[in-house]
Image (spheres, grey):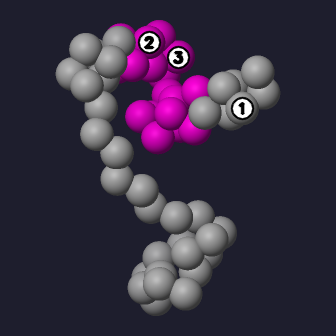
């Protein structure tokens, strides 16, 4: 996707994106992911995959 702009230390096959979350949403995410014992990025990726399947 953006491989031509990647630095030599960045991973191939993935791209870093910055995103801003509303405080209330972030709190809800953190509460839910403590139940699932997932890392934040893992939780967000899972939520995105679920959204794309619907």
Position of residue 20 measured from the top left corner of the image (x, y, whole percent): 28, 39
- For label 3, the SS is helix
Q: Is residue 46 left or right of residue 15?
A: right
For image coordinates 34% across by 45% down, the residue present is 19
For image coordinates 47% across by 82% down, the residue present is 6
Report the front residue among 45 and 34: 45
Q: How many callouts does the rendering have?
A: 3
Judge whether residue 1 is colored magenta. Answer: no
Q: Which residue is mark 3?
A: 36
Q: Residue furthest left?
A: 23
Q: Which residue is mark 2?
A: 32
Question: In which image quadrant can residue 32 be found?
Answer: top left
Label 3 vs 1, first from the N-terminus: 3
Which of the two discs, 2 and 1, sits closer to the camera?
1
38 relative to 15, above or below: above
Question: In which image quadrant can residue 48 be found?
Answer: top right
- For label 2, the SS is helix
Which of the two discs, 3 and 2, sits closer to the camera?
2
How many residues crowd mark 1 within 10 Å: few (<14), some (14–19), many (20+)? few
How many residues crowd mark 3 within 10 Å: few (<14), some (14–19), many (20+)? few
Q: Are marks 2 and 1 in contact (CB under 8 Å)?
A: no
Position of residue 34 measured from the top left corner of the image (x, y, whole percent): 41, 16
Report the front residue among 54 and 35: 54
Disc sitting over residue 52 in the figure: 1
Q: Are marks 3 and 2 in contact (CB under 8 Å)?
A: yes
Q: Is residue 29 left or right of residue 26?
A: right
Position of residue 51 measured from the top left corner of the image (x, y, whole percent): 66, 26
In magenta, the rendered stretch is 29-47
The secondary structure making up most of the magenta span is helix
Do we see residue 41 in this rendering? Answer: yes
For image coordinates 52% across by 30% down, the residue present is 43
């Amino acid at each position: 996707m953006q491989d031509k702009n990647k630095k030599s230390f960045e991973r191939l096959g993935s791209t870093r994106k910055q995103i801003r979350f509303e405080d209330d949403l972030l709190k809800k995410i953190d509460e839910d992911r403590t139940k699932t014992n997932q890392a934040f990025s893992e939780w967000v990726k899972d939520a995105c995959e679920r959204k794309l399947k619907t």
